[in-house]
Image (cartoon, grey):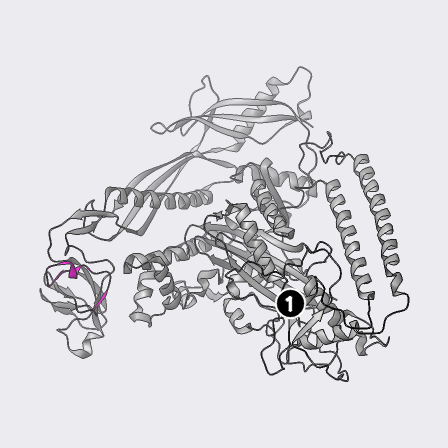
């Protein structure tokens, strides 16, 4: 039995869709496609223009499958920036209900979004020494609902909403690996870092650095448009031999920040668990930059660096562009991981953020009944259509599909999908959508199948005596069932399913004899060839050109009778569903929740309603205070210093009289000998622009030295961008070993010059401060002791140092470095809970038993914070619930 499974990965810039075909234990890539999403439609994972996104995805599906389709089931993941994943450790003796409650209590303090408005799911990672590790994932319900609505409007049915981290790791990580592995998904805007260990994702984090930072560095240093810079990045990358290593040198600085984050993440995990990742798997579009794995490997010791291989264990050699797909398959890694889960292959760790939200059980039951009835109508229509046989070939009707003639076998194969009656909107898909209707035909030498796939690709069916080939006309007409134009009666992939059904699924021939092996597949093809559509179409034509069946005139009576039976079934099913949901209090006639379940989260036990709440205003400080009018909580201070540097583009301008351009050249001395270069030493660009050193300088062996230079001539001709330089005064054999380069432009030759403005400095400082804040938050999280609470309002920062050029300095680009000291006051949660418990005891009525009541999660509200004295006023609140 063959089955299709789909995985859909949507990001800010593009959407990738992969279809897998599973049959007899083997898995093959059926087709793949990618469509670009216009800017602004999705921003940081949030859908801004759902209507435009629906249009893009619908048109994409029209090309991927065809317009004659119904809803296709797809596995989906939410963007990494909109999901929040944590690992919680709980006692192993808790039952599922208590575990879920405990996880929710832990999550309240760890999530940046309210738990009441979050879609959540969790699964068990491992169990050891009386404790159990849980992987917990959450996302904002409004974000999830927005994606669900768009996907459904585009003609798809989400089977599940997975975590992008799990989907990616499912595709590129071997679950049997015993050592931890770190996956770096380097996208355009962000880099997501995941640590896979002991069967699941143990740590997930992201940083706002990605491929765009690499392109921007080239844009600034070479003073070229961003599009051209992006092309240079993808063409030269980290190749030390391309342009004398110029591109690699430019990319080193932004890449160093990504490498630092990788080191910090590996160190943090090792400090927490004692287990250090030994493998780094690169993923994302930036993983395709030339020589990036070699460069990363040379800069990270102790890590085996590879580019992810999401096609492990999948058959792909039957695709038209198989070699091309293998090279770029890492772009489709998350979509492949989703399709693998949808196919039930290599599922492993998984969550479904859509479980327990959205439809009530009654509404879902009604939807399933409606789907079953629709499928039954479709089945009846197809069966009756297959029984319609005429003595002569039918004339083309309005819904007859006209297919192009099949070329001779030596020619390239025709499109595997019939052209739709109306051409869908053209999309720029990259790469072109691949079609494969022959996944069951095993290639002569197939790809190696991993142990986690149950069986290898099936052997080709036994040889069948070839039937005489029928002549192929210029056009082949194929009668389609009488169905509505919108395809509402079709099952998924009607164009594919009907053709494949003709090729594989018919168990008997026209004469009633069974084909060898139980399958009537027409002339047998060699195992190393793709099945031609010609034989499939000819077999379909033969079946349609048989003598009329006696009694066929009464076919409409059979159809009418079946329709009546279906209507009776529908009425009974709807009545039963309404009776069931009313009896169980799931929903009333109009889909509203019954009063006893309103306001609860589906899938979670109903919590007792709070009978009251308790509130305490407490003082918090770092030194013990004598008793006062407010209860006191003794906290402690933690500090961390963080530094960051980056390159920025100068946007200011200053007036300058026409003079000689000035700048800085870096001299590279790759010889074992020291030299002294005198003032006026010449440096020549490839374009013939001459510069001279301003003063004598010592050039150390095997080192680089920065020297100030001035253009030889007055005028704007000396205003050049970053460049390479030869030194004409050196012997020819030394000019390749001692040379110059510049990272910034030379300025000052014209009447105006680019300059660093005060606004540039403020913007640079703000960008660096935001980056350092994220780094400090991560450091503080590692510094917290068990049971301590860190409040964002109690974190302060002070500037230690800021290094940058002064305002109005003439230059086109500049480098700034910022060092900040972050200080936070943390408080023990036990002290806060004790104050609330005492307050609750005071509020309980006389005679009440304290053990009959419990407190909900504690809410912390900072009302005042005096940084000079390290004192704060915090209001503590919690709900009182009766057990």
* Relative height, residue 797 to residue 285 (above, below): above
Q: What span is colored magenta in the figure?
A: 710-725
Q: Can residue 7 be seen in this view?
A: yes
Task: Find out whether residue 767 is within the magenta segment.
Answer: no
Residue at (81% x, 77% y) in the render: 515
Q: Can residue 84 be seen in this view?
A: no
Residue at (86% x, 47% y) in the render: 568
Of all residues, the one furthest to the front in this rendering is: 395
Position of the N terminus, as image quadrant, is bottom right
Of all residues, the one furthest to the right in this rendering is: 551
Residue at (24% x, 58% y) in the render: 744
In terms of image quadrants, where is residue 868? top left
Q: How many marks?
A: 1
Give percent across and percent down for residue 35: 52, 58
Give percent across and percent down for residue 380: 81, 58
Position of the C terminus, as image quadrant, is top right
Is residue 155 or residue 352 the one in the foreground? 155
Of helix, strand and loop, which one carries label 1?
A: loop
Q: Name the residue under label 1.
A: 418
Is residue 417 or residue 332 the one in the foreground? 417
* Relative height, residue 814 to residue 586 (above, below): below
Q: Is residue 181 left or right of residue 746?
A: right
Give percent across and percent down for residue 807: 20, 44
């Amino acid at each position: 039995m063959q089955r299709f499974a789909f995985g859909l990965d949507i990001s800010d810039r593009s959407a990738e869709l992969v279809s897998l075909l599973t049959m007899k234990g083997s898995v093959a890539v059926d087709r793949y496609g990618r469509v670009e999403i216009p800017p602004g439609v999705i921003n940081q994972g949030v859908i801004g223009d759902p209507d435009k996104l629906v249009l893009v995805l619908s048109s994409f599906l029209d090309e991927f499958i065809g317009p004659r389709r119904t809803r296709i089931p797809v596995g989906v993941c939410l963007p990494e920036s909109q999901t929040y994943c944590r690992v919680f450790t709980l006692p192993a003796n808790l039952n599922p209900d208590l575990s879920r409650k405990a996880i929710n209590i832990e999550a309240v303090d760890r999530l940046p979004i309210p738990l009441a408005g979050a879609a959540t799911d969790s699964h068990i990672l491992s169990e050891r020494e009386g404790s159990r590790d849980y992987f917990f994932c959450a996302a904002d319900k409004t974000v999830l609902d927005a994606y669900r609505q768009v996907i459904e409007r585009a003609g798809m049915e989400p089977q599940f909403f997975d975590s992008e981290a799990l989907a990616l790791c499912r595709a590129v990580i071997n679950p049997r690996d015993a050592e931890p592995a770190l996956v770096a998904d380097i996208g355009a805007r962000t880099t997501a870092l995941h640590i896979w260990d002991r069967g699941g994702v143990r740590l997930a984090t992201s940083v706002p650095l990605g491929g765009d930072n690499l392109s921007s560095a080239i844009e600034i240093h070479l003073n070229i448009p961003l599009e051209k810079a992006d092309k240079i990045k993808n063409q030269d990358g980290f190749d030390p031999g391309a342009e004398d290593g110029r591109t690699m040198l430019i990319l080193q600085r932004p890449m160093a920040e990504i490498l630092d984050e990788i080191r910090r993440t590996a160190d943090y995990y090792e400090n927490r668990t004692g287990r250090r990742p030994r493998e780094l798997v690169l993923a994302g579009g930036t993983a395709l930059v030339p020589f990036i794995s070699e460069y990363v490997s040379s800069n990270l010791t102790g890590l085996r660096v590879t580019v992810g291989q999401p096609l492990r264990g999948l058959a792909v050699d039957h695709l038209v562009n198989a070699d091309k797909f293998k090279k770029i398959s890492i772009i489709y890694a998350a979509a492949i991981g989703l399709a693998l889960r949808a196919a039930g292959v290599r599922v492993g760790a998984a969550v479904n953020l859509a479980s327990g939200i959205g439809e009530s059980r009654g509404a879902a039951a009604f939807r399933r009944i409606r789907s079953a009835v629709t499928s039954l109508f479709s089945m009846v229509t197809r069966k009756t259509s297959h029984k319609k046989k005429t003595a002569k070939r039918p004339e083309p009707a309005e819904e007859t599909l006209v297919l192009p003639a099949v070329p001779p076998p030596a020619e390239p194969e025709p499109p595997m999908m019939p052209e739709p009656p109306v051409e869908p909107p053209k999309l720029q898909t990259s790469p072109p959508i691949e079609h494969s209707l022959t996944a069951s035909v095993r290639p002569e030498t197939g790809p190696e199948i991993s142990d986690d796939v149950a069986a290898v690709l099936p052997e080709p069916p036994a040889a069948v005596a070839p039937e005489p080939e029928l002549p192929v006309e210029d056009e082949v007409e194929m009668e389609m069932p009488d169905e509505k134009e919108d395809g509402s009666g079709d099952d998924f992939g009607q164009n594919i399913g009907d053709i494949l059904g003709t090729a594989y699924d018919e168990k008997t021939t026209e004469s009633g004899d069974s084909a060898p092996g139980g399958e009537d597949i027409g002339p047998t093809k060699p195992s190393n060839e793709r099945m031609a559509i010609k034989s499939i179409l000819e077999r379909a034509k033969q079946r349609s050109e048989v003598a009329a069946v006696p009694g066929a005139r009464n076919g409409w009576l059979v159809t009418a009778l079946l329709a009546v039976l279906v209507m009776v079934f529908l009425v009974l099913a709807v009545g039963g569903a309404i009776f069931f949901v009313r009896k169980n209090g799931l929903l009333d006639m109009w889909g509203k929740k019954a009063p006893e379940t309103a306001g609860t989260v589906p899938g979670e036990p109903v919590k007792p309603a709070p009978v009251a709440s308790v509130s305490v205003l407490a003082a918090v400080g770092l030194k013990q205070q004598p008793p006062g009018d407010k209860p006191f909580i003794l906290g402690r201070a933690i500090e961390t210093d963080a530094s960051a540097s980056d390159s920025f583009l100068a946007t200011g301008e200053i007036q300058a009289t026409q003079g000689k351009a000035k700048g800085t050249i870096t001299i590279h001395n790759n010889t074992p000998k020291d030299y002294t270069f005198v003032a006026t030493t010449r440096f020549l660009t490839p374009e013939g622009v001459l510069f001279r050193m301003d003063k004598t300088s010592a050039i150390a062996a095997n080192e680089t030295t920065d020297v100030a230079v001035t253009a030889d001539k007055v005028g704007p001709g000396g205003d050049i961008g970053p460049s390479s330089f030869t030194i004409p005064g050196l012997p020819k054999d030394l000019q390749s070993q001692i040379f110059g380069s510049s990272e910034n432009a030379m300025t000052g030759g014209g009447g105006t010059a680019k300059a660093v403005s005060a606004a540039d400095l403020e913007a640079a400082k703000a960008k660096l401060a935001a980056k350092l804040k994220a780094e400090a938050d991560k450091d503080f999280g590692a510094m917290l002791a068990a049971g301590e609470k860190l409040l964002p309002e109690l974190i302060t920062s002070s500037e230690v140092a800021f290094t940058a050029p002064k305002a109005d300095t003439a230059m086109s680009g500049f480098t700034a470095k910022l060092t900040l000291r972050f200080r936070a006051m943390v408080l023990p949660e036990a002290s806060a809970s004790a104050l609330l418990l005492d307050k609750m005891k005071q509020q309980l009525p006389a005679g009440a038993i304290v053990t009959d009541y419990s407190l909900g999660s504690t809410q912390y509200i900072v009302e005042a914070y005096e940084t000079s004295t390290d004192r704060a006023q915090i209001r503590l609140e919690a709900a009182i619930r009766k057990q």
